């Protein structure tokens, strides 16, 4: 048996065993309300294996990445270095700093002018402290799957560098994402501009970034390509409309990570209130904190109105911060309640709240249960806290409608680590479904039927991927 992702039954079992789920498959399943005998496998063992096969073999719709295009990676762009150190440049670097490595030492690990063979000695003292975190496990799985290295030590580094060089060749995105991770498409939030005209448009689908439309605003990044000399708020509105008219047919959603710098408490501020503040910004005159917020609020809602008119879901960062030594937990805790206000203020907008608002996921789950237009994306969650991610999904499936959760987004810049994250997500989804069956919350048929929507069906529907992929296949820039 093979899948449309190319995974055979034997390969799937081998991968599940390597991911640490063999014990889960072999444990007894006892459903309090089982499906009729005619609708389920003949034995409990058969059911567990069948569920494992479906979880491994169903392609993932990846709803959030920061991947540069492959050609940029091959030129060494958008990453700090072009050797095995790049695997330690995103997320695991934060755990290393939390564990005690100095920022200066870490900079050398990801530097271009440091011999790859010398980098391991800088990480080695801290590796035991971080290798079992979600970030650490994603890196270890990627190294094992891509380079055949089970344990990092002094003897493995030469093989690691050789493996990195052998994989990082033309076509390696397809090899890692499609062939190894069984991902059918990724949704990319480009970090180098508002929208990336990707050379692989049907694999690397793109969000349209709205953060610079309302934060700043970023007159150069948005006004320049639009060819507009911005002299008034009305001009800026025209710039925003230009971006939507040009890219909305090809974008899968809009995205804002403004929650890194402020709350999600966006008031619906009229243009006449925002106009004088915008004029001050143009004139580079100081504005107060309240004035700045009123302008941001107005521009946020203007962008959201455009997104809604073009039937684009609005993705918002919620919860945990990337990086280290900076998270304002008090403000982050308010994200779920503010998310509820957004749903109430614009019921016609499809809101996608990212990262499960970790660690305040129970409050966000209440929002998804209550509001028809609220969806929760588990992107990043499986590596922030794998156990909390499982508990979130377990609670969601018995609390809120199952068609409102998106279960995977790698959220990585280095494509190699997406593979590790995808393995963790599949393992977590499988264990979650098995636990719900064992505890009697799901019947066996229920669990089997949930695999397709959880792994890709929900994403396909929420982001209207079939239509987008058809247009992207004929994108004018390719």
Image: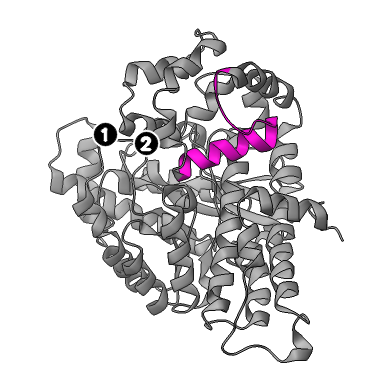
Q: Is residue 269 visible?
A: no
Is residue 67 placed above or below 110 in the rendered structure? below
Q: In which quarter of the image is residue 339?
A: bottom left
Comparing 28 with 158, the one in front is 28
Q: Which of marks 1 and 2 is nearer the N terminus?
A: 2
- In the image, taking residue 221 as reference, residue 55 lies left or right, namely right
Residue 61 location (% of width, % of height):
64, 56
Highlighted magenta segment, given as a residue range: 134-154
Q: What element carries label 2?
A: loop
* Whole-number angstrom distance, CA of label 1 to CA of label 2: 8 Å
- In the image, taking residue 105 as reference, residue 54 lies left or right, namely right
Disc 2 residue crowd, few under 14, some 14–19, many 20+, Cα 10 Å: some
Q: Does the magenta stretch include residue 144?
A: yes
Give the number of marks.
2
Check the image and tell me how it is coloured.
Answer: one colour
Q: Residue at x 30, y 35 (%)?
A: 324
Q: What element carries label 1?
A: helix
Disc 1 residue crowd, few under 14, some 14–19, many 20+, Cα 10 Å: some
Label 1 belongs to which residue? 282
| Contact, mark 1 vs mark 2 (Cβ under 8 Å) | yes
Label 2 belongs to which residue? 230
Location of the C terminus (image quadrant): top right
């Amino acid at each position: 048996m093979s899948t449309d992702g190319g995974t055979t039954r034997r390969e799937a079992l081998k991968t599940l065993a390597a991911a640490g789920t063999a014990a889960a498959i072999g444990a007894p399943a006892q459903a309090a309300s089982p499906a009729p005998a005619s609708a389920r496998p003949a034995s409990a063992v058969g059911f567990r294996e069948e569920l494992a096969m479906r979880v491994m073999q169903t392609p993932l719709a990846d709803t959030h990445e920061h991947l540069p295009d492959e050609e940029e990676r091959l030129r060494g762009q958008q990453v700090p270095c072009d050797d095995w150190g790049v695997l330690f440049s995103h997320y695991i670097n934060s755990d290393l700093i939390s564990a005690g490595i100095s920022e200066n030492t870490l900079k050398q690990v990801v530097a271009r002018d440091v011999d790859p063979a010398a980098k391991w000695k800088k990480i080695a003292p801290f590796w035991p402290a971080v290798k079992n975190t979600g970030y650490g496990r994603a890196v270890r799985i990627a190294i094992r799957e891509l380079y055949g290295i089970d344990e990092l030590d002094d003897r493995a580094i030469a093989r690691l560098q050789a493996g990195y060089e052998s994989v990082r060749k033309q076509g390696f995105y397809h090899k890692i994402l499609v062939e190894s991770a069984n991902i059918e498409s990724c949704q990319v939030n480009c970090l180098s501009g508002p929208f990336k005209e990707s050379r692989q448009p049907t694999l690397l689908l793109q969000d349209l970034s709205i953060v610079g439309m309302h934060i700043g605003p970023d007159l150069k990044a948005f006004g320049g390509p639009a060819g507009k000399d911005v002299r008034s708020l009305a001009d800026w509105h025209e710039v925003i409309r230009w971006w939507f008219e040009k890219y909305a047919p090809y974008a899968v959603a809009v995205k804002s990570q403004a929650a890194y710098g402020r709350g999600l408490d966006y008031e619906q501020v009229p243009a006449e209130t925002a106009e004088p503040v915008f004029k001050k910004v143009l004139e580079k005159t100081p504005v107060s904190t309240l004035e700045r917020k009123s302008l941001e609020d107005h521009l946020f809602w203007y962008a959201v109105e455009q997104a809604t008119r073009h039937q684009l879901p609005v993705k918002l960062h919620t919860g945990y911060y990337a990086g280290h030594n900076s998270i304002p937990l008090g403000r982050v805790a308010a994200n779920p309640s503010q998310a509820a206000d957004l749903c109430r203020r614009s019921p016609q907008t499809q809101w996608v709240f990212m990262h499960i608002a970790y660690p305040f996921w129970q409050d966000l789950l209440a929002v998804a249960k209550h509001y028809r237009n609220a969806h929760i994306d588990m992107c990043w969650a499986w590596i922030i806290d794998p156990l909390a991610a499982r508990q979130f999904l377990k609670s969601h499936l018995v609390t809120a409608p199952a068609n409102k959760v998106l279960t995977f987004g790698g959220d990585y810049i280095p494509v190699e680590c997406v593979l590790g994250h995808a393995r963790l997500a599949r393992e977590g989804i499988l264990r979650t479904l098995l636990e719900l069956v064992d505890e009697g919350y799901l019947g066996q048929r229920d669990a089997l039927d949930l695999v397709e929507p959880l792994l890709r069906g929900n994403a396909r529907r929420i982001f209207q991927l079939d239509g987008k992929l058809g247009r992207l296949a004929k994108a004018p820039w390719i």
